Amino acid sequence: MRVAVVRFPGSNCDLDAVQAIRTVPGMKADLVWHEDPAISGYDAAVLPGGFSFGDYLRAGAIAARSPALRHVSRMADGGVPVLGICNGFQILVEAGLLPGALLKNTTLKFVCKWTNVRVENTNTPFTRAFKEGQILRVPIAHSEGRYYLPERDLRRLEDDGGVAFRYCDERGRAVESANPTGTLGNIAGVCNEMGNVVGLMPHPERATESILSPSGSSDGRHIFESLLRND
Amino acid sequence: MIRMISGELRLGLTPREIETVRKVLGREPNETEWAIIDAEWSEHSSYKSSKKMLKLLPTTGRRVLLGPGYDAGVVDVGNGYVITLHIESHNHPSAVDPYGGAATGIGGVLRDILSMGSRPVALLDMLRFGDVARSNHARWLFTNVVRGIADYGNCVGVPTVAGDVEFDESFERNCLVDVACVGLARKEKLILGESKNPGDVLVLIGGSTGRDGVGGASFASKNLTAGSETERSSVQVPAPFTKKLLIDAILEAAETGLIGGMKDLGGGGLSTALSELASKGGTGVDVELTKVRTRHNEMTPAEIMTSESQERMILVLAPHGSEPVLEILKKYDVPHDVIGRVTAAGSMKVRVDGKVVADLPVELVTGAPLIPWGSKKPNLAGRQAAARPADPKIASSLLALMSSPNIADRSWVYRQYDHEVGTRTVVKPGDGDASLLRMPNGRMLAVKADGNSKHSSLDPRSGGAGCVAEACRNVVAVGAEPIAMVDHLQFGDPSDPEVYWSFQESVEGIADYCSELGLPVVGGKVSFYNEDSSTKVAIKPSPIAMVVGLDDRMMRPMSWFAASGESIFAIGRTKPELGGSEYFESVLRYAGGSVPKADPAGDKRLYRAVLKLVKYGLAAAVHDCSKGGLAVALAEMCIPSAVGASIDLARVPADTPDPVDLLFSESHGRFVLSSRDRKGVEKILKASGVPYSMVGRTEGKMLQFSRGRRRLAAVGVGRLAKAWRDSLPEMMD
């Protein structure tokens, strides 16, 4: 399994993602510059976190219109797994590969903390290794992560299994007190109808080694390991 | 087009300095030459007031590869890896434009780390403001400084992992915004800020040159006045995205091994960078200003030479064979222009369209004469301790301390910083006394910075030693051995003999402590003129020390009690040292008394003993005692897991029987440690020769104090937690 981690000018979690993926046996990861057409040749693509193009205009807006996204879009249409983490999620939303929008947190502040996230949909190439309802410990770090969708579309997204991850408390309840950003329905990540494109605000690449986690977990790793599972 | 005529000169030079320049040069310098000398002879760039005293600091050691004098100190951390350390402040800019000032302060320190060819891997921010509980202005500064740091640091992808915040009325008009950076590199990839080979070309890269920051070094070297508000143009404009590209491009270019020398453009702009490259390399430079990309038409040569526009660096490249470096700059869209070359003559030649507009000996530019300031011991009022209240009201005093802005939970600050990017942060802010970063050589690096202006104002010598001692304790508490430090010395106007005396005392205090401990000072910064000329209020003396430590073990204690049934030890001796304490300030509203004195010889034994306990896995939790004393240290250990403790004050090793001293004195050289193996701990501590005693156990949901059988106070851990956690958010949001 060869994964392209797409580096935009301003990406800053790109090296972390490469390193995290490489800790999984059987997986290879390369850093691919956003202008490099070689992206298309990979088995999966990861759009990492950061501030692509300085977040000018809107987070992810400029990257969504870069040449890389034409390749990524074709890959997504062809069923190739595509994962957007944090700014990568913002890019996928801006590019229309995922529904909705990511607005400024209700606190209007950047927030960096570890959260509990519940897996809502295990039928994506990035969530196959989980049991439904499994709780992951993963950190967030962003100021624009409040997921938004008009109510009718949100209901359809929920009904179609489009919500991939939800913030929850230690016992798995998606309560308001466990919602770090005011995101709609505690939504932390979503997927497209085919399920092959997934975006999430938490950073699994920061939670792949137990030494990095305050609780000693390495839950983020299973997101990448899922790619090796054939449903 | 370069404008050749300018308005009046705003020089910061003294009449004596002006005379010296004329004498050495043997002629009247022109306007451009004056501007160059003014920038480089500013306090900010020349250290003319402090250089002599700084020689007292120990700067060598077996791990030190490069001490003070370069853009960053370099310390060997083993297996072919080095770390680079640097500390800066952006006080004056932040006082007039807190958001931009704080942000560009990070930009500056990052470039220093980058110019060594090292990757910036951690930022620390040490902030000082007025009384946030009362002052709207202080809250405005605090809010925007933190936002500036967050927006810039988060964007460039360098985690902000630690810091220190202190509030005091003396910072009301002059806030302090210090930022330190740690870099990581392979030893053989280091690049120095020197131009050794005549014929090499000088390439200016990064942002364009504008009027922002013109005269910034000079601005930083004066007291703030009512007119300072109009000096906003002396503050640079932050551009973190440009900086991010610069970082990526430079790190990739450094890998080629083709960069002969590198220097960031900070205070003093091109003038300072060029003269220092030439001075360190023993060469000269010859530059053409029409090659410099300017942001405005009609900039004068003086403005171009002293502009402090952000995100610019100078590379020294061989005239041939450097194409790979230029290719990388192109890939990242980093503008780059050859603006001149290195010459054999020791002079700095500046041209416009080939015509020489400045020609100065490098030695003159970098050779600002030192200023022998007078020094006088002030009459330090209030030496004697405050009258003690008959009833110490322990519970309410402790709750007041927990909610004091100087002690309260800092998560309001560090939650706004990305402290995880880079996936190196093993112990994160709030999870330990220091932060711990993993390095590619398999070792851990602990980092923490501390300072205590309240101690320093009453006794600058003890305060200076104390800030090093506190940072060392924090590093030791996470199981790391202190290996090096950098300092930042911040004072008022040095022409005031009493201010200069406090500076001298602080340096001597730091030098004595570090020499005895064997802790090298590999770099630092001095910032004078933190004084408001209308109110004549100078800041309290504010030395700050950032200490780094190495940890080879995987044993890491917690910094809080995790479970009931553990034995609690007080290690180190408590003395009646309430001077400058938080108890005096926020409970008794009194400033004075005799401040804690650090004992480096005793601390050396103490650190060794605590590190041994950690190494043998005997320490379940370790936390140092500092602001608020033993009582606050215990409360902070109870809060995270809501575990109570019962403490017998009669057993605390001490030179005083007074419960107020025992609870709230801020004596240095003390730790609280908990363990499940009482005998194991006692065996090691007995052999170590440090004062210690088992003072209680973790149990229940209350923090209880007794003396022998007499119960003195009990406070619910929930109440302590609420007081501590709610304080800053309630003040700020």
Image (cartoon, coloured by chain):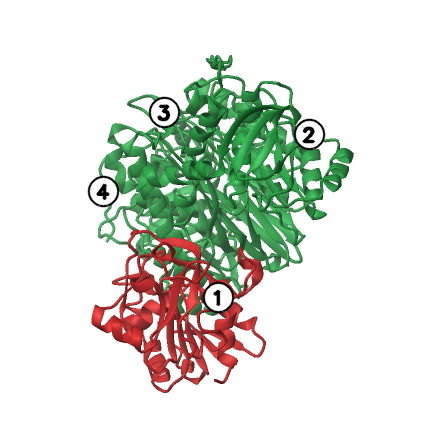
Closer to the chain start, of discs 3 and 4, is 4
- State the image coordinates of residue B677 (x, y, percent, origin top left): 71, 43
Between the residue at mark 3 and the residue at mark 2, the CA separation in whole angstroms equals 49 Å
Count of labels in the image: 4
Residue picked out by circle 3? B15
- The amino acid at mark 2 is Gly
Residue picked out by circle 2? B602
Between the residue at mark 1 and the residue at mark 4, the CA separation in whole angstroms equals 57 Å
Picture residue at 63% right of the left edge, 39% below the top:
B673
Between the residue at mark 3 and the residue at mark 4, the CA separation in whole angstroms equals 24 Å
Is B252 placed left or right of B139 in the picture?
right
> For the residues tagged 3 and 4, is the chain the same?
yes
Between the residue at mark 2 and the residue at mark 1, the CA separation in whole angstroms equals 44 Å
Between the residue at mark 4 and the residue at mark 2, the CA separation in whole angstroms equals 63 Å
Tell me, what hue is chain B?
green
Is B78 placed left or right of A164 in the picture?
right
Closer to the chain start, of discs 3 and 2, is 3
- The amino acid at mark 4 is Ile
Labels 3, 2: front one: 2
The answer to the question of whether label 3 and label 1 lie on touching residues, with beta carbons closer than 8 A, is: no
Q: Which mark is residue A205?
A: 1
In the image, is residue A73 above or below residue B273?
Answer: below
Residue picked out by circle 4? B5
Picture residue at 30% right of the left edge, 22% below the top:
B535
Tell me, what hue is chain A?
red
- State the image coordinates of residue A88 (x, y, percent, origin top left): 37, 69
Labels 2, 1: front one: 1
Q: Secondary structure at mark 4?
A: loop
Callout 3: chain: B
Labels 3, 1: front one: 1
